[in-house]
Image (cartoon, grey):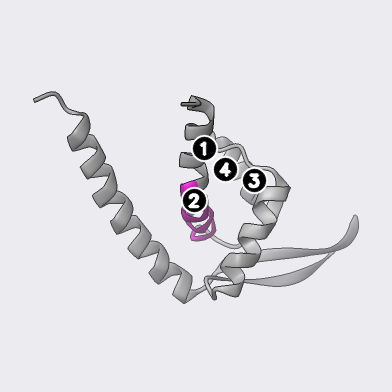
Amino acid sequence: MDIENAKAQMRKGVLEFCILGVLQRGEAYPSDIIAALKEAQLIVVEGTLYPLLTRLKNDGLLNYRWEESNSGPPRKYYAITETGRQFLGELKKTWDDLSYAVSKTQQPQ
């Protein structure tokens, strides 16, 4: 088994959860989201982020607004919706339960 592939799949599985977590702090421009994820050691590129943002928006978990920029085209800022906050709360509970279960399987008997 390829360990790098397994690691990538694990990170990919929690990326939407992490994006919602970043946006619960306040609205953000995609490069700000990428920076926050990188700071948490989750390396993400724009080509990965934009489809996830679109899917989360289409699911009603995010919305966005346009803001004019002095240095180029308008910028799209994303924010979590109330539905997104509720969904994030459920994901947090699931994550806590899963994390507990995984840690229990890793303890010596």
Mark 1: amino acid: Ala
Quadrant into which the C terminus falls: top left
In the shown orientation, is residue 78 left or right of residue 88? right
The magenta span reads 13-24
Q: Is residue 5 magenta?
A: no
Q: Residue at x 52, y 49 (%)?
A: 15
Taking depth in this image into account, of 85 and 57 the one nearest to the observer is 57
Mark 4: amino acid: Leu
Say if residue 51 shows up in the picture: yes
Residue 18 — which label? Answer: 2
Q: Is residue 83 depicted above or below 56 in this figure?
A: below
Q: Residue at x 20, y 34 (%)?
A: 105
Q: Could you tell me how far apart the alpha carbons at marks 1 and 4 are, in whole angstroms? A: 5 Å
The mark that comes first in sequence, 1 or 3, is: 3
The mark that comes first in sequence, 2 or 3, is: 2
Q: Residue at x 53, y 27 (%)?
A: 4
Picture quadrant where residue 43 is located: top right
Q: Residue at x 72, y 48 (%)?
A: 46
Mark 3: amino acid: Ile
Q: Are marks 1 and 2 in contact (CB under 8 Å)?
A: yes
In the shown orientation, is residue 36 left or right of residue 30? left
Q: Is residue 65 depicted above or below 69 in this figure?
A: below
